[in-house]
């Protein structure tokens, strides 16, 4: 089992979004005269939703012998019908046998990790596709 996690750029994106949300609430407070308690409540709600968003959408890929886990979605290799590599800035994705498209979100990973993931997926699904 091997786990791949995003680079520091993902953390920078998360922090930038949190700072942007906080600044926008304070700017809103400047133009619309709302109480300090309401402003702090809005900042707290924005921070909670940002935390939930970044915590559960963090692109993590885990490769095991018989399964691949993308974020928190576990897919068996035998359920993967095809792999489509990235083309011109698009994210690579896999298509399962029931027609579900799953984006891999490899752009947040190191280039070395991206190529390793792609090669491991291709190794795992090519023998399965030849049998069918």
Image (tube, rainbow, N blue to C red):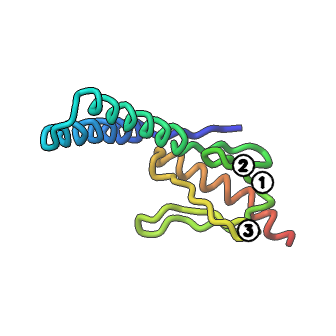
The residue that appears at 62% across and 60% down in the rendered structure is 102
Q: Residue 81 shows which numbered tag?
A: 3
The residue that appears at 74% across and 61% down in the rendered structure is 125
Q: Secondary structure at mark 3?
A: strand
- In the displayed structure, 40 sits above or below 62; it is above
Q: Residue 74 shows which numbered tag?
A: 2
Q: Looking at the picture, how far across and down is residue 25, in whole percent?
A: 25, 39
User: Is residue 121 toward the left or the right of residue 93 in the image?
Assistant: right
- The part of the image, by quadrant, that contains residue 36 is top left
Mark earlier in primary sequence (1, 3): 1
The residue that appears at 73% across and 53% down in the rendered structure is 75
Depth check: give the residue in front, 114 or 48: 48
Residues at badges 1 and 3 in contact (C-beta under 8 Å)?
no
Label 2 environment density (alpha carbons within 10 Å; few <14, some 14–19, many ≥20): few
Separation of residues labelled 1 and 2 (CA atoms)? 7 Å
- In the displayed structure, 79 sits above or below 44; it is below
Depth check: give the residue in front, 82 or 127: 82
Q: Quadrant of the N terminus?
A: top right
Which of pointers 2 and 3 indicates the residue nearer the eye? Answer: 2
Q: Secondary structure at mark 2?
A: strand
The residue that appears at 63% across and 55% down in the rendered structure is 119
- The part of the image, by quadrant, that contains residue 94 is bottom right
Depth check: give the residue in front, 15 or 25: 25
Which residue is most to the left?
31
- The part of the image, by quadrant, that contains residue 45 is top left
Separation of residues labelled 2 and 3 (CA atoms)? 15 Å
Mark earlier in primary sequence (2, 3): 2
Q: Which residue is mark 1?
A: 76
Q: Quadrant of the C terminus?
A: bottom right
């Amino acid at each position: 089992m091997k786990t791949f996690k995003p680079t520091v750029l993902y953390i920078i994106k998360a922090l930038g979004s949190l700072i942007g949300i906080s600044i926008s609430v304070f700017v809103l407070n400047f133009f619309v005269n709302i109480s300090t308690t309401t402003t702090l409540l809005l900042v707290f709600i924005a921070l909670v939703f940002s935390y939930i968003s970044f915590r559960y959408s963090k692109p993590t890929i885990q490769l095991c012998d018989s399964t691949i886990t993308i974020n928190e979605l576990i897919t068996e290799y035998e359920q993967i019908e095809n792999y489509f590599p990235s083309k011109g800035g698009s994210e690579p994705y896999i298509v399962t046998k029931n027609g579900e498209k799953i984006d891999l979100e490899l752009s947040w990973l190191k280039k070395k990790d991206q190529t390793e993931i792609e090669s491991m997926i291709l190794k795992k699904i090519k023998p399965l596709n030849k049998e069918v």
